[in-house]
Image (cartoon, grey):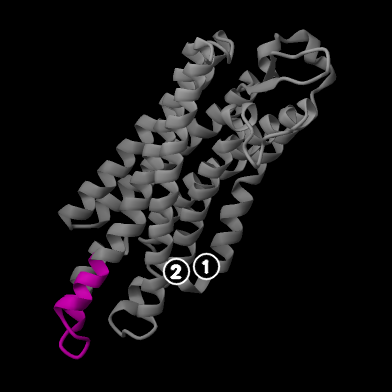
Amino acid sequence: MLPPLSIIHSASDIATLFFIFGCLLFSIFSLVSVFQFHVKTLKSYLLKDFNSLWTVRTLLVSFISLWALSELLRLPILRRYPFPIFGSLTLTQQINLCKIHVVLTQGFFEPGFLVSLLFIVNISIRKRNPNDTWAMDICLLLSSCLPIFCLQVFFVFFKPKQEARFTEGFFRSYVIEDEDDGGSGTVLCTYPLLGTIIFGAFAILYIVIFLLSCWRVITLVINKGLRYRIYGLALAVLVALPTQVLLLGISVFWEPSEPAFQLIALAMFLSVLSCALVGEGVLVIKPIVDALAIDAECCSWRCDDSSREGNKDTAAI
């Protein structure tokens, strides 16, 4: 019979695995929809104007999928029991997994899908054809994640010499549990406070820029449905990011073996997951559905320019 602590950990980890699986299924559906729509636009005169953002939408879904997969690295259930992937790792290997998890989630994958959301919102209201600069946009998108990624790598893998001046929680990204004389045990992942401060600064700057971009879209479009979608997307970002930063900050007050930490980690994961799924729904699935609906309602030889322009706002984002 498992001890109570293991039961609590297992329940939290199983719930996380369930939500990761659901996120991956939805992301696969989104990717398939993007590629099918891209192929369909090559044969449709009407839909060609709605295909300009397919590369950035692919990046958005890819970042979300990779972020969900990287959450597997922190789950102790995959290292405590004989799973095929993480079943027999040494303590050093488990420690490196925790460090990689912090760097990838807070330094690259999550900033990547957040910046992708911002790019899609900004590109969709450009006057010129976004296809003309898609390569530059993707390079700018990836390069915008490099500063926070480099900072996370430096402070997680290369601790500065002044570390002794700070409390342990500033740099701690793992805790070793149940270590025996043979050097075996389970490593539980934590979130260093300094990494939280770096991510929090990014989140504040991002929220300001994202809300300004959403306001620009709302002032330019006249379609009420699109406005409601932008309101929902902005609300999701505005709620999820501050909640995540708050939970990251207070997580340092508990050890990762305590039930409170497990609940905080699960709540933090769900807050980011909700933002990611809303982003996929609003900026990937809904625009494709709207564009296909427009294509079904009228053939290209019957649609004049005025009707196409009137519907473009609906399917652009």
- Of residues 288 and 75, the one drawn nearer to the viewer in this rendering: 75
Residue lying furthest bottom in this view?
A: 301
Task: Give the side of residue 87 with respect to residue 281, left or right.
Answer: right
Whether residue 43 is situated above or below residue 204 in the rendered picture: below
Residue 206 placement (x, y as % from top left): 48, 38
Whether residue 88 is situated above or below residue 215 in the rendered picture: above
Cα distance in 3D space between marks 2 and 1 = 6 Å
Give the residue type at disc 2: Pro
Examine the structure image and report whether residue 304 is included in the region drawn in magenta. Answer: yes
Q: Are marks 2 and 1 in contact (CB under 8 Å)?
A: yes
Q: Residue at x 43, y 57 (%)?
A: 28
* Disc on res. 68: none
User: Would you call the spot at circle 2 few (<14 residues within 10 Å), some (14-19), or many (20 or more)?
Assistant: some
Q: Magenta stretch?
A: 290-307
Residue at the disc numbered 1:
134
Residue at the disc numbered 2:
130
Residue 54 in view (yes/no): yes
Query: Label 1's element?
Result: helix
